[in-house]
């Protein structure tokens, strides 16, 4: 899969607490975005620590099957959670830090395993339709699911930044993990909420479908759109294109 990514501080924050990376082990890849929480109490440390841990472990021993990848991602989140809790207990300034995570492991023949915790998102573009393949672990999403709020109200709610799950905030870090099979021309989009909360779904789709844009240019365009919409948060985007013949 051809992948590129871009992270930007946005227009309102004094520090970028998002982290993004791509790791490769043979023909397998690991794409990771972590959005640190806790402000000046170590959110950037939490995000960087989580990405580094997953990357090191992937490069040492990458999963080779869907079953293995699902368990591997769950185990990595558990390890990261334990490590962040340990750091928080050791240093007062780190107490209250945590991070969201969205990660994708690519396997041969277009198989991809996507994991998330928090409100960083994963999408797959298939047959010109963009589908969110992760679940937002957020207060407003719970309200939407229960019928107490519409999606439009959720986008405007002052509670939209309250997440219900994260790595490093409690002994339990429950991650969602699902597997998908990509077809030729399908695309993967991973992002922090600095993009998804400011750029409409249809606009995301239009950028990914633009045949004149490379994956690099798509990342640049999406970041620019989020900044043009106010750049209220750090913005991190990763785009991958699946080429069946090359794979």
Image (cartoon, grey):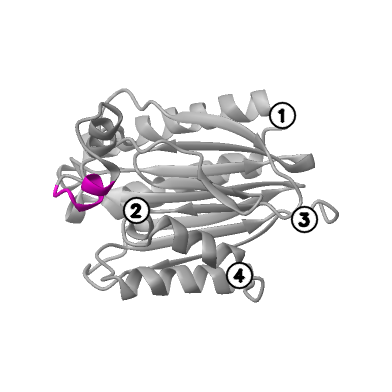
Contact check, label 4 and label 1, Cβ < 8 Å: no
Q: Residue at x 39, y 54 (%)?
A: 192
Please name which of the two marks, 2 or 4, marks the residue nearer to the observer: 4
- The residue carrying mark 4 is 210
Residue matched to label 2: 193
Q: Secondary structure at mark 1?
A: loop
Residue 53 lies, in percent from the top left, at 48, 42
Q: Secondary structure at mark 2?
A: helix
Q: Quadrant of residue 12?
A: bottom left
Query: Taking 227 as reference, is 13 left or right?
Result: left
**Pointer 2 or 3: first along the chain:** 2
Q: Relative to 71, is 92 above or below?
A: below
The magenta-colored residue range is 152-158
Question: How far apart, in angstroms, are the residues tagged by discs 4 and 1?
Answer: 33 Å
Left or right: residue 145 versus residue 3 is left
Residue 202 spot, x, y in % from top left: 46, 59
Other-residue count near label 1 (Cα within 10 Å), few / some / many at <14 / 14–19 / ≥20: some
Is residue 40 shown left or right of residue 121? left
Spatial CA span between label 2 and label 1 = 30 Å
- How far is disc 2 from disc 4 in space, using C-alphas? 22 Å
Q: Earlier in the sequence, mark 1 or mark 3?
A: 1
Asked whether, in this view, residue 176 is left or right of residue 3, the answer is: left
Task: Give the SS element for disc 4.
Answer: loop
Other residues around mark 2 within 10 Å, as few (<14) / some (14–19) / many (≥20): many
- Residue under label 1: 65
Q: Secondary structure at mark 3?
A: loop
- Judging by the rendered image, the residue that carries numbered circle 3 is 243
């Amino acid at each position: 899969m051809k992948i590129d990514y871009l992270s930007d501080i946005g227009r309102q924050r004094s520090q970028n607490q998002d982290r993004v990376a791509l790791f490769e082990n043979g023909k397998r890849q690991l794409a990771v975005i972590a959005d640190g929480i806790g402000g000046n109490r170590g959110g950037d440390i939490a995000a960087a620590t989580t990405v580094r841990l997953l990357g090191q472990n992937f490069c040492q021993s990458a999963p080779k099957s869907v079953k293995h990848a699902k368990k591997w991602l769950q185990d990595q989140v558990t390890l990261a959670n334990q490590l962040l809790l340990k750091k928080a207990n050791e240093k007062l300034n780190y107490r209250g830090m945590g991070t969201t995570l969205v990660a994708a492991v690519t396997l041969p023949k277009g198989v991809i395993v996507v994991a998330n915790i928090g409100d960083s998102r994963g999408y797959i573009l298939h047959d010109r339709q963009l589908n969110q393949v992760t679940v937002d672990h957020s207060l407003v999403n719970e309200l939407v699911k229960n019928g107490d709020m519409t999606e439009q109200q959720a986008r405007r709610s002052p509670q939209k930044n309250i997440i219900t799950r994260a790595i490093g905030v409690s002994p339990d870090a429950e991650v969602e993990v699902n597997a998908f099979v990509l077809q030729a021309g399908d695309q993967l989009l991973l992002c922090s909420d600095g993009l998804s909360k400011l750029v409409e779904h249809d606009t995301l789709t239009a950028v990914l479908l633009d045949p004149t844009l490379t994956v690099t240019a798509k990342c640049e365009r999406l970041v620019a759109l989020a900044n043009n919409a106010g750049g209220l948060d750090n913005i991190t985007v990763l785009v991958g294109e699946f080429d069946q013949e090359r794979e």
